[in-house]
Image (cartoon, helix red, strand yellow):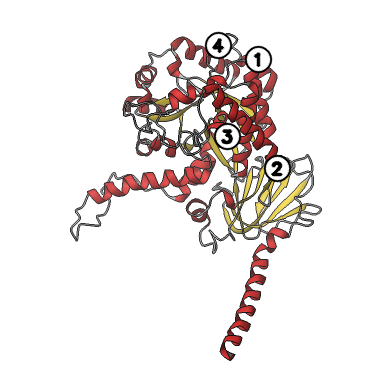
Amino acid sequence: MSRRRDFLRTSAAVTAAAAGAVAGIAGPADAHGDGQPPKDTGHRGRRYVIRGGAVMSMDPDVGDFERADVLIEGKRIVAVRPDIRAADAGVIDARGRIVMPGFIDTHHHLFETAERAFLANGLLRDDGSGSPSAHPNYSEHILEGFARVYRTQDVYINELFAGLSQLDAGVTTVLDVSQVHHSPEHTDAAVQALIDTGRRAAFGYFEGDGRIGARYPEDAHRIRDKWFPSDDQLVTMVMGGELHLGREVYTRAWAIARELGLRIAAHSVGSWGMRPVFDAVARGDGGVEVGPDNLFIHMTGMSDETWQRFRDAGAHVSLAFPIEMTMRHGTPPILKMQELGLEPSLSSDVETTMTADPFTQMRTAMTMQRMIVNQLVLDQGTPVPPDNWPTPAPGTPDLLTVRDVLRYATVNGAKHLGLDGRTGTLTPGKEADIVLLDATALNVAPLNNVPGAVVSLMDRTNVETVIVAGQVRKWRGRLLDADLNRLRRDLEASRDHLFKAMRLPQNLFA
C-alpha cells in the first residue's frame, strides 16, 4: 500500500509536469497579444513581423533559416532574416512553426464540390466491365450529367466552399477549371465566388454545355473588361483552350486568349482519345502555335514527338498524380519529364474522387515516382546476393526528394500560372502568401528536418495560419470571416438539388 501511495504521488507529479509541458508547447501559439491577429493585415502601411519560426523561403537567394523573422508591410514581404527590428509593427509569434510559401494548385474543378467522393471508385469513362469503377463514371455522370444541371447559385456555393476548404489546407493560389459556363450568369457566379473566397486564383474560362445563350469563347472579352481590367489583382484570368472541342472552337479560343494577353490551359489525356489532335498541333498542322503561355494538364499517353516539341516551345505541364493513377488517365509522365529536363506543377483535379489538399499531392508524387525508379534499380540486379542491392546504372532517373515536390507545389505552380513575380517564394518584394505549419503537433514533433516534416509527416491539421497578400485569412486553426455552418447548409441544399435533377438516389453507403 505504501509503495502504491508513492506511485500515485509520483504519477500525479509527472502528470502535473506533463500538463505544464503541454502548456509550454502551446505557449507560442498563445503569445499573440490579445489572441487576435495583428489589426488590418494586408492594408497599405500596416506592418507586422512573423517572428521566430523555422523559415523555408523556397528562394535560393534568400535561403532557409532554423530561426528567423519575416517582415510584412501592406501586402508585400519586406525582409526575411533573423532578428528583424521593426518599431510599432505587430507580431505573430511563430516559435515552433514552419514558415513557408503558400501552396499552389494548378488545376482544380472547384464547381464539383457537391459531388465529393461520389466517384470514389470511378474511372474517367465506362470501360464495359460492369464493375463499380465503370458505373458511375466521370464522363457520363459528371461532365454529361451533374455539370449540365447547375444553376448559378450552385456554381457560386460549390466554388466558394471548395475555395475556403483549400484555403484552410494552406493552398493560397488555384487555377479554377470551371466547365459550367452555360451562360454569362454562370460565369459571373464563378468569378464572384473566387473573389469572395479571399485567396489568389486564376479563373479558368472553359466551355459549358453549349446551350442557347452560352457564349464561349467570345464572352472572354466581356469577362476581361468586367472582372479583370487589371492584371494586378488577387484573381486573374486564364483561357481554357481544349483541343478536343474541335479545330474551329479551339483556334478561336487560343486567338482570343492571345489578343487579351491570357495564358491558355488545356487537358491532354491520351486515354480520352486526344493524342491525334495533339500530334497534329505538335507537327504544326493544328492551326495553333504552342508557346510559353500554354499549360497542359496531365499529358498522359502523348507521343515522344509531341513531348519534344512542346518542351522546345517552352510549354508547362501540370500533373495530378493521385487522380491520374486512380481514374486511368495513364501513368503520370514524371519520368518523361525528367528525361526532357522538365518539372511539373501539381494539381488536385477532382474532389469527386480524391481530396484536394497539397500534402496528398506531394506525397503521392514522391512515392509514385520512387516506386517506379526503385523497381527499375532492383531489376538491374537479381534477388540473389550479392547482386540484390545494385548500384543504379547510368541513365537511371534520379529519385525525387522532398525538396523536389515542395518546389513543384510552390515555385513551379507560380511560374506555370505566370504569377512567379508575385508569389511562390518568400522573397522581399513579392506579395505575402504564407503558411505557418505547426511543428509541435503530435504527428510531427520533434522537428528534425523541415522539408521532410512538411512532405512526409504533415496534413491539413498542421496548417495553423494562412496569409494571402499580407492578410491573415486563417488564424490559430480557424478560418476568418466565414460562416462555415451556413455555407455547409447551402452546399448541402445544392447537392440535394443536383441529385434530384439527375434523378439519382442519395445512398450514403452505395
Spatial separation of the CA atoms under disc 3 and disc 2: 17 Å
Tag 1: amino acid: Arg
Whole-percent x and y of residue 361? 48, 42
Q: Which mark is residue 222?
A: 1
Mark 4 = which residue? 211
Spatial separation of the CA atoms under disc 1 and disc 4: 19 Å
Q: Residues within 10 Å of mark 4 (few under 14, many from 20)?
A: few
Tag 3: amino acid: Val
Earlier along the polypeptide chain: callout 1 or callout 2? 1
In the image, which is nearer the foreground, mark 3 or mark 2? 3
The kind of secondary structure element at disc 2 is loop
Q: Number of numbered discs present?
A: 4
Q: Which mark is residue 470?
A: 2
Q: Is residue 346 left or right of residue 202?
A: left
Earlier along the polypeptide chain: callout 3 or callout 2? 3
Is 160 or 171 nearer to us in this picture? 160
Mark 3 = which residue? 174
Spatial separation of the CA atoms under disc 1 and disc 2: 30 Å
Q: Is residue 475 visible?
A: yes
Whole-percent x and y of residue 371? 34, 47
The kind of secondary structure element at disc 1 is helix
Q: Residues within 10 Å of mark 1 (few under 14, many from 20)?
A: few
The kind of secondary structure element at disc 4 is loop
Whole-percent x and y of residue 305? 33, 25
Q: Which mark is residue 235?
A: none
Q: Is residue 345 left or right of residue 222?
A: left
Tag 2: amino acid: Gly
Q: Residue furthest bottom?
A: 2
87 above or below 45? below
Earlier along the polypeptide chain: callout 3 or callout 1? 3
In the image, which is nearer the foreground, mark 4 or mark 2? 4
Asked whether disc 4 touches disc 2, contact meaning CB atoms under 8 Å apart, the reply is no
